[in-house]
Amino acid sequence: MLDFQQKLKFLVNLRQISLGKPVGIQFKRTKILRQASNIESRSLSNNKLMFKHVLIAEDLDSVNIAVTQLLGSLGIKEIENTQYCDQAFLRCKKAELDNNPIDLLICDLSFKQDFRQEKIENGEELIWKLKKDFPALKIIVHSVEDHPTTISRLWDSEKIDAYICKDRNGMQNLKEAIVKVYNDEKFLPKSLKDTLKQDNIVQIADYEVRILKLLSDGYTQEEIHVKFKKEGTYPHSKSSIEKRLKDLKEDFGARTNPQLISMAKDLKII
Amino acid sequence: MLDFQQKLKFLVNLRQISLGKPVGIQFKRTKILRQASNIESRSLSNNKLMFKHVLIAEDLDSVNIAVTQLLGSLGIKEIENTQYCDQAFLRCKKAELDNNPIDLLICDLSFKQDFRQEKIENGEELIWKLKKDFPALKIIVHSVEDHPTTISRLWDSEKIDAYICKDRNGMQNLKEAIVKVYNDEKFLPKSLKDTLKQDNIVQIADYEVRILKLLSDGYTQEEIHVKFKKEGTYPHSKSSIEKRLKDLKEDFGARTNPQLISMAKDLKII
DNA sequence: TTTTTCAATACGGTTTTCCGTAAAAATTAC
DNA sequence: GTAATTTTTACGGAAAACCGTATTGAAAAA
């Protein structure tokens, strides 16, 4: 009973939603693109040891091309690409069977829907599944997603070795990450560390998220009460659900339920 | 009076939200990445006329690299890159002054926030501003955004020459688009045409969007009524606002206001 | 065991939303 | 011009959400 308290917590950066701007100011000068393109020529001379066999799981062909090029410039010979999660999983399996295992996976989180019916629907699932079968596999997440919720969930899970945001310095950061991870270090760019270190953070448990989801799915509070009661979820009284919503609104600074749902959507809680 | 009816309409694909999947099934085989990378070698022999001076406005360095490479492979000599909207605008101005105008702009829609304070906040604004000063400028939009609302707003505006989604075939489509646009044609990939041609489409006027926005900002219906009355927005009676919300819920298949807001967020109406 | 504490529940009154009906105003058709 | 249709507004009862208070119950502390 009362087990909801021990469940996964979500980190929510409240300041981010109110301002709509990142808080941690970066002082690094933006690298212009030419420099990024030049990575190749500069590092070909680099004869250090490096990953042998790398798999890129990324649906956007453009990003796939850029990452492949970066890996090549780092002297990595065997580079496999896939645009689907299921295929990524199978490739890892096959590489293992062929006695030529994948050393490093660089993987996106969100994959666009397609005509294909995928069993593994996103990068996160792929990571959980792979880590179960290959606990030693190094994984670098490479995603546009920069919400603290997502980053901390993955980073704190200890299942990944680096989290790189696709942004203006993405390739630069990715390069650094690959080198660090090869040397058995974990890597998180400074800007992301700042994002996670922020104060204005509220913890939200599964139970609350559940209520928000149901509310956004059109359930009334009364219906949530009935549903919870029926399925044995606890607490399930109308008063308790009312109270949770009231607390959530207070935490988020929302005045009405519609606003609460709107904010929860912005924060990617639901 | 009643001028809200003549305002911009938003196209909403209702089926997309209920299923969470694209409707138009694509039968094209997915091109594997190697092929995409090989564009370069295959097309270097192509000596046809091509754009002379192209500007890429794209915040992600990875995509920037890939697009630059594609342009190079098409024999385009002068390629400028920028990761900021303001800079893109200035570059166009400067190129004009230097008597070496930009022939083609390939531009993203969403740009991540930065420490820089930008006047032009997104690609769409950039396009409006540029088209005012350079009506003849060719523009290809290159974005991950694939919601019918966004696509049709830009496509129907007649301000752009092509809309390409960053997806599994993005580079392939972009290449085709460049060639077509050079020949004074407009170009929309088949998959996107299908997206726009769908039936389950509801038109939503500014007025409705306004109500949804206010609701998601925490206004009660009563408060919306007062606000509209004060500012002279018409209709503004409680009953009318109630009715609009009722109709919206019916159109969207939502049961409650929170669900309505949730769906509107998913559909990127607000 | 008893006490303390805190979360869950119950309840009642108020506000907000919901929904039907109907009158008034505006638009369109004739 | 009038008639027909649609839209806006008004009103009132019902349902849902809101909010404070009080009670119950379970775990933790004494």
Image (tube, coloured by chain):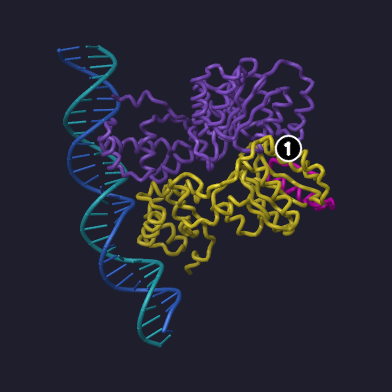
Chain colours: A purple, B yellow, C blue, D cyan
On screen, residue A45 above or below A67: above
**Residue visible at 52% across and 66% down in the picture:** B6
Q: Position of residue B217 (x, y in %)?
A: 45, 47
Q: Is residue B100 magenta?
A: yes
**Residue visible at 70% across and 38% down in the picture:** B66
From this viewpoint, is residue B121 visible?
Answer: no
Q: Which residue is mark 1?
A: B38
Q: Position of residue A17 (x, y in %)?
A: 50, 39
Q: Camera-side residue: A239 or B250?
A: B250
On screen, residue B211 above or below A217: below
Give the residue type that dot 1 points to: Asn
Q: Which chain is home to disc 1?
A: B
Local crowd at mark 1 within 10 Å, few (<14), some, or many (≥20)?
Answer: few
Q: Which residues are magenta?
A: B78-102
The residue sitting at the front extreme is A98
Left or right: residue B191 versus residue B52 is left
Q: Is residue A268 magenta?
A: no
Report helix, strand or loop for mark 1.
loop
Q: Position of residue B221 (x, y in %)?
A: 38, 54
Left or right: residue B68 versus residue A192 is right
Q: Camera-side residue: A109 or A22?
A: A109
* Quarter of the rendering containing residue A142: top right
**Residue visible at 28% across and 30% down in the picture:** A234
* Quarter of the rendering containing residue B137: bottom right
Q: Position of residue B101 (x, y in %)?
A: 80, 52
Quarter of the image with the C terminus of chain A is top left
